[in-house]
Amino acid sequence: MEKTIVITTINPPKAEIEKFSKLSGWEVICVGDKKTPANWKKDKVTYLSPSKQAKIFPKMSETIPWSSYARKNIGYLYSIDQGAKIIAETDDDVFPYSNYPKNIIKNKNLTVLSGPKFINIYNFFGNNGAWPRGFPLNFINNKSVVKKKKVRVLALIQNSLIDQDSDFDAIYRLISNQKVKFMKKGEFAIKKGSYCPFNTQNTFFHLEVFPLLYIPCLVNLRVADIWRGYVAQRILWEMGGNLTFMHTTTYTKDRNGHDYINDFKGELPLFLQTNQLIDILDSLSLNKNPSTSLLKVYKKLVTAGIFVKEEIKILETWLKTLEKLH
């Protein structure tokens, strides 16, 4: 399993998962929960049932809450244990296009974007007034000039956009909720010093940054993957890497049901604390070891009240499990 795609589900096998299972060169890992049908099975998909999770990673399985999107962490660990060199992630309501990338190379000559503290990557792929979930509200109408320069970059984390019913926050959905189709060409990198949120719906991680896959377990699922992404970007700079964004390679057709007011409540930390989180990330002195830097960041975020102290225990279990797998 050199290249895996990790998905979580509480639903019966869906057409979206079947589509991913037919992609050449990729192995699909599906992580279940206690709400997932007990007889879940799909050809060419490795299903990790609750009992199997407890068997293969007992300490990690015990520390992650059930009915939690963070069960996805078990899928990452399983992929690493099976020898994965690249781990992709998506959700069970996302379809791959025929251009789903077959080869995610690390070294690329790309246009690097810089200037503002936050860069809305959607603006470079034919945006129609949308912004990524987790983008600070006070920067949405920022008109700062974004500089461009062609540079050789180390692309250890790569996010690809999603067409149609993309990953928008509750405010966008409540006031607009327009579906968006992005360009099917183009790729950019974000320069050190600037940020752009990315999610878990269509992202690719290389082996060097596998520790940064960790999804925090004790925050709302509407927040967890976004804050994971901001932390990963900051540590990536210490490793000489850049977060990159590529054209759309997936789309949504029948998105899982959402109550947008409940989503809004869950996303409140994104709206109210993201600027504080970024200030903390910028203030820290980190190193190129992703594991030690990750632990240092989380301890600081606990001190700041952004994470609860119990998150540290789960993260330490994650890091110890990784050590045993390498």
Image (cartoon, rainbow, N blue to C red):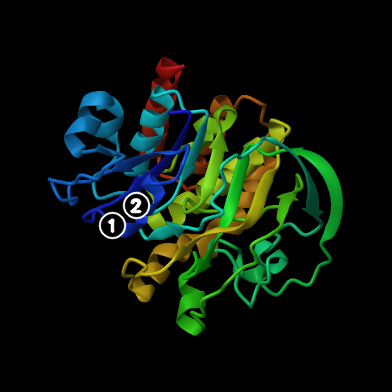
Identified by mark 2, the residue type is Ile
Identify the image quadrant of the N terminus.
top left
Residue at image point 47% right, 50% down: 200
The x and y percentages for residue 312 are: 42, 34
Query: Disc 1 versus disc 2: distance between alpha carbons?
Result: 6 Å
The x and y percentages for residue 221 are: 38, 55
The x and y percentages for residue 255 are: 37, 68
Mark 2, other Cα within 10 Å: few <14 / some 14–19 / many ≥20: many
Left or right: where 34 falls relative to 307: left
Residue 164's tag is none
Query: Can residue 131 be seen in the rendering of this structure?
Result: yes
Residue that label 1 marks: 14
Marks 1/2 in contact by CB < 8 Å: the verdict is yes
Q: Please, is residue 324 above or below residue 297 in the view?
A: above
Q: Please, is residue 273 above or below residue 22 in the view?
A: below
Residue that label 2 marks: 17
The x and y percentages for residue 302 are: 47, 41
Q: Secondary structure at mark 2?
A: helix
Query: Can residue 299 be seen in the rendering of this structure?
Result: no
Left or right: where 265 falls relative to 197: left
Q: Nearer the viewer, residue 88 or 146?
A: 88
Identified by mark 1, the residue type is Lys
Residue at image point 70% right, 32% down: 238
Q: Nearer the viewer, residue 148 or 94?
A: 94
